Amino acid sequence: MGASNNVGAMGTSLLASVRALGFTGTIYPVHPQEKEVQGLRAYPSVLDLPEVPDLAVIVLPARLVAQALEDCGRKGLRRAVVISGGFREVGGQGVQMEKDLVQTIRRHGLRLLGPNCIGVTNPHHKLNTTFFPHEGEPGFIGLASQSGSFITQMFNPLARLGLGFSTAFSVGNEADLDIVDCLEYLALCPRTKVIGLYIEGIKRGRAFLETARSIAPRKPIVALYVGGSETGKRAGFSHTGAMAGPDDLYDGMFRQAGVIRAESITELFDFCWVLGSSPRPRGRQVIILTNSGGPGAAAADACGRAGFELPALSPATVQKLTAFVPGTSSLNNPVDLTFSKNPSALFSEIPQALFEEDQADALLVYFLTSSEIVKRSLRFLGVAEDRLVEESLKHIDGQCEALVNVARKFDKPLVGYTFRPLEEPGIRGFLRRGLPVFPGIRRAVRALQALTAYSKFRAGLPAESPADTAS
Amino acid sequence: MGASNNVGAMGTSLLASVRALGFTGTIYPVHPQEKEVQGLRAYPSVLDLPEVPDLAVIVLPARLVAQALEDCGRKGLRRAVVISGGFREVGGQGVQMEKDLVQTIRRHGLRLLGPNCIGVTNPHHKLNTTFFPHEGEPGFIGLASQSGSFITQMFNPLARLGLGFSTAFSVGNEADLDIVDCLEYLALCPRTKVIGLYIEGIKRGRAFLETARSIAPRKPIVALYVGGSETGKRAGFSHTGAMAGPDDLYDGMFRQAGVIRAESITELFDFCWVLGSSPRPRGRQVIILTNSGGPGAAAADACGRAGFELPALSPATVQKLTAFVPGTSSLNNPVDLTFSKNPSALFSEIPQALFEEDQADALLVYFLTSSEIVKRSLRFLGVAEDRLVEESLKHIDGQCEALVNVARKFDKPLVGYTFRPLEEPGIRGFLRRGLPVFPGIRRAVRALQALTAYSKFRAGLPAESPADTAS
């Protein structure tokens, strides 16, 4: 409801997004006058539809929404999304209008997402009710967000990292369904490996704590809470009318529930990335593998500041490595290969030996791979000019494949970092295969911290967690 | 010396880099046997050259370097770069070999950069003695780095941000010229607007402090120090033999000298970006401008945590804005325009009014511009399909130009943030014009913190600084 042939209207963009992603269910535009909307047969009211739809998506002026929901209820719908704003978040009359919505849906047993939200995106089901076109592939990150932008504006950055949403909910004013309900859904969703939360303020604190605590031992939860500063609290209130609480309260709640707290939007998704894709480290012993001293030293310092330890390699490991490394290299930790004579060992024998090192809980690996430099080498080796691009891509992809195969043999995480563009084939090859490679050292180390924190939380639980037995 | 026709050799790549950037001076390859190297006439020894070159670049096995420098000295050269490693950083005999180098150059009055470095890049002079091909345009960041990677691996990321080096020095083992000498050079370099330092350990602490303190009141200095943790200290030592000191010592030294300390490589360059491109804020009052609630609330929270204040708009400012904003918008701070009816005001009248707000020391602006959405709108306005790309780019570039023109009228910084790709025309248009737009909220707020810290340092000085009058 609200889609039309008026090209400036939000509802029109929204219908375009739904169709652009290739939703295969039947769509019924509802419009008081139009007989046809964007080539689809339109109906004057929900009551006139030939069947009962699974979901209503409503983008109408605020004052018309209650009646639209009333019609949905009478028709027998069970689920509705209200995109329209102008309710509690604007105060005054909006507050009463939101109460009216709630009364209407309660009367009919309808459940409602919104109002003042951007809807829901489930790319696995090719459903995108946001007005922003979807980009990238479906993925494993389930999101419940008190801001729609952190769904739509993440389509592109996630796609660049080889990531995507399983389902993402914009909860808006949470007049009915709230962030706790979404959490329950995402806990059960088999396509969701990790749950992300963007929070300006939680209404049902007790329920949140209990729900999150029951989920976290099975599925990691990452949260960004922005209501903890005076400035954040005020901004959140004027955005969705959220009532923010003191920062320590949320911090304590997250700790109790085993929720990993992120410090920024970038971290929220970085943490989801590593938690959804990597084995859990047993401890805080990290081996850094690099072919360049500065990126090694800077990573070592970042690790030290983050509470990681860099164990010396055991004699057995040093022995294994000696065959593959040049005389200039350093077999301390960071393992610095400098300019390797046999770069392919960097993607196979060397990480294999480091994974086998008993003391290593995790590997942090610097990637410099430049397709231009590979091309230059292949040219020197006599590869014909017209086969250079294809051969270099094949060569690079083979290296990525080899390393990912080594990593899969071990129950230890490998986290990469680089300053090369993510589009560089030697980085892309890892991202496509689900190996996290972070742009920058601090992001990689912080992600490893999140992974370690979650691992510790998991290890600290009794064999059966209280939450599990309680359910 | 060390360049050859042997395609795997480092010296060969290096000569290729020098030539690729289009260096216009004369290049003399020196090679014991070859008559011609990469198409240039080669000479058996420096002593045979037809003139005295300005600079020697030496990439030879460590044991041959002292003799090569001896030849340079006898020929009358004054400057040499030694790329070769295998000296102090490997210990043992390497320590003595490095002492020999120093004795040789002292005897002849030669000055030396290195050994165990990657050389120097000055793209303004089309000089790149690193073995990595240069990318992007010359810029305003002067760098002195104890890691060559943070020169070569930054060519691409800096270019993506519209940035570049003025001159970048890899100082290596600092057998002669050290980071303090580079600092002195960069202070005088008219193309360097800001100085970046990557530090694993400073040898001449007192000289560093005095030099930095004399420069910082005129030219900002940003430093990343990675020797402050036990792990960073060990890694730095095995990289360049640097002797790192306790973290607080460096922290105190940086504070005394007015050096802004970065926490990561990413921040080192982010801080250089904003310090080299933005007016200095008078205080800590920030106005956030957004068209989306979540990015506004998250930025407000990040600002609060970073010690910024978000003043309420004065009635005069609210009055000015009312004409340009829709009823759904919020005229608090963050100023949230929601879905503006007149998006062009976002790039002109609205920021103009916010700059004019007395209480505003800085503007933090969220950019969402998507060329796809602009194209969609223009199509709706009747622009022909074959002119859509051109017209949308023109439209977007006009918006960027308009905002940059507004910003230039005021002596207050405008820092942008976005989640769109930096290649998006609506972001690129700002970067090309030197307006910093950060990928992510925390990076933008941290950069604003660095700018504010420097501004405070500058404001705290007496009219004439002690450092100035002492010289």
Image (cartoon, coloured by chain):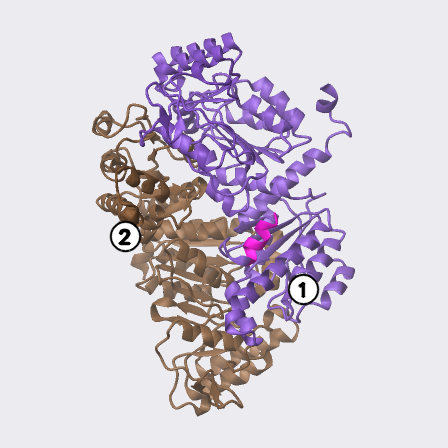
Chain colours: A brown, B purple
Nearer-the-camera pick, A178 or B289: B289
Residue B111 visible in the snapshot = yes
Horizontal arrangement in the rendering, residue B388 relative to residue B33 (left or right): right
Q: Is residue A182 above or below residue A299?
A: below
| Chain under numbered label 2 | A
For image coordinates 34% across by 29% down, the residue present is A338
Count of numbered marks: 2
For image coordinates 44% across by 44% down, the residue present is A443
Residue B272, percent across and down?
Answer: 58, 38
Task: Tell me the distance, in whole angstroms, between the alpha carbons under discs 2 and 1.
Answer: 59 Å
Which SS class for mark 1? helix
Residue A352, percent across and down?
Answer: 23, 38
Q: Is residue B435 above or below residue A142?
A: above
Q: Is residue A38 above or below residue A22?
A: below
Mark 2: few/some/many CA within 10 Å (<14, 14-19, 20+): few
Which SS class for mark 2? loop
Q: Quadrant of residue B250?
A: top right
Residue identifier under label 1 = B345
User: Bounds of the magenta span?
Assistant: B426-434
Horizontal arrangement in the rendering, residue B334 relative to residue B117 (left or right): right
Q: Amino acid at mark 1?
A: Ala
For image coordinates 64% across by 67% down, the residue present is B329
Residue identifier under label 2 = A464
Q: Amino acid at mark 2?
A: Glu
Residue A8 visible in the snapshot = no
Mark 1: few/some/many CA within 10 Å (<14, 14-19, 20+): some
